[in-house]
Amino acid sequence: MGIVAGLDSSSAFTRIVVCDTETGAVLRQGYAPHPQPAGEAVPHETDPQAWLLSLGEAAGGGLLEGVQAIGVSAQQHGLLPLDAQGGLVRPALVGNDKRGQAAAADLIESLGGRQAWAGAVGSVPHSAQPVAKLAWLARTEPEAARRVAVLMSPHDWLVWQLLGRPARRTTDRGGASGTGYWSAATGAYRPDLVELALGHRALLPEVLGPSEAAGTTPEGLLISAGTGETMAAALGLGMGPGDAVVSLGASGSVMAVHHEALSEPGGLITSFADAAGMHLPVVNTLNAVRALRGTAELLGTDLEGLSELALKSTPGAHGLVLLPYLEGERTPNLPHTAGTLSGLRRDSMKPEHLARAAFEGMLCGLVDALDVLRSRGVEIRRVFLLGAAADLPAVQAFAPGLFGTQVLVPGPADYAALGAARQAAWALGVARGTAAPDAPPVWPAPAAQLFEPDEEYPAWQGVRQQYVATRDQIHPGAF
């Protein structure tokens, strides 16, 4: 028996769950927002001391009493550039910083194109990645860039702080795989890519295995390896081979558990490692709920009203097809395109048909992403559907048939914090000799609504064929 804690430091807040090691039952919870900086804040930059202040507040009132191990999850794609003494060279650059877009394009060209990057590290640089942040820093703040001696991610830095800033600095496979200079396929850093971006090499954290501990505090509290929020959430959901997550934000993403690292010559797949010794290939789309919101505004309603309208139509929306590429698109790679509404006829020009076309278009765009993974041998038997739009009746009615799988909509929970706690329980068990190092502890699956493909499945195949035919006619050769 034991008690562990999972800490999730997102871009805006810290959440902590305290769990029983055997059952995963949540015993206590804590929450605190990150303090807002005084005066004018620079977008996409932060003083990481705010994370520690938030952590302290969330853990107040004896929340961690009796805890024997802590796991840390934190926002991804952040970068903390440190000098040789471990001090910050400049404020931390957080994940949503898009200023490195031009630098990312230059990096792609410098290494010989998208295929070269996909082969090197399993991903193609984009503005949010640390490797692009380094190139931006070298270009815009050369004096600061010259002082950079150590590179850390947010969860690396938090683990290091909890351990009292030891000489040994660590990360995990999941966090390392998001940097753009570590390969999930080889399990090794590419320091030459750091040099390509920054102008010189820097000290990189030691990459720990999933069940390894980063260290123990002077008080005897074990700190596990930690990981990024995406990997922690997958661990908290209990994902395994055959499982995928479709995340519905303004943009969309599809990730699945797979036994090996994958790459795709055009860079459609980002090859992450997970927090359990497997891999998490991810495919992103630029347009998901933004297509629904745009359609709802056009029809003078909200998302709930749009869902009600869509359910009044029939599969195929009377021939209307919406290609939802409102902000360009990443899957397929069409950065400069626009959305298209096709199939307009007099009998299809009704609000309910347009509403249905919006839902079918968004979901078919995500099927494109699922198909990228399936074409590389990824088995997908069930899909976890996440995001506020996952609760819309139209999404729940349409997704199983279009995805061709079971769809689960988990109840609300702090899945990243739960995953961090599960990792802590794993590392604690391994350290005590009561757990195997190759399998995380088995905790109960989260409560979820289950939706199965219905008897109209052939009709859904027709919807998909109609969408693909329209996509290929307007954008031939996109895939």
Image: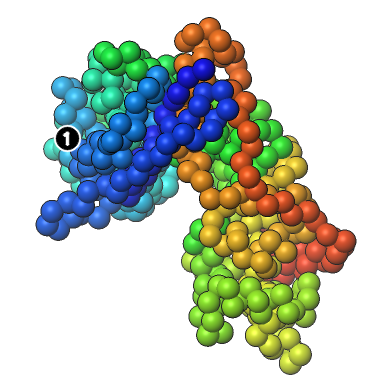
Name the residue carrying label 1.
89
Task: Tell me the residue at 22%/25% (across/down).
Answer: 149
Q: Pick out the residue farthest to the top.
A: 433
Task: Tell me the residue at 74%/92% (across/down).
Answer: 346
Marks counted in the figure total 1
Q: Position of residue 157 (x, y in %)?
A: 29, 30
Give the left or right position of residue 463, taking residue 132 as reference. Answer: right
Give the left or right position of residue 367, taking residue 296 as reference. Answer: right
Give the left or right position of residue 385, taking residue 345 as reference. Answer: left
Is residue 180 shown above or below 358? above
Q: Pick out the residue farthest to the bottom.
A: 346
**Foreground residue, 157 or 216?**
216
Q: Position of residue 3 (x, y in %)?
A: 45, 23
**Would residue 384 be seen by someone viewing this image from the given angle?**
no
What amino acid is at disc 1?
Val
**Would residue 291 be seen by someone viewing this image from the given angle?**
yes
Q: Position of residue 382 (x, y in %)?
A: 72, 45
Task: Tell me the residue at 66%/63% (across/down).
Answer: 395
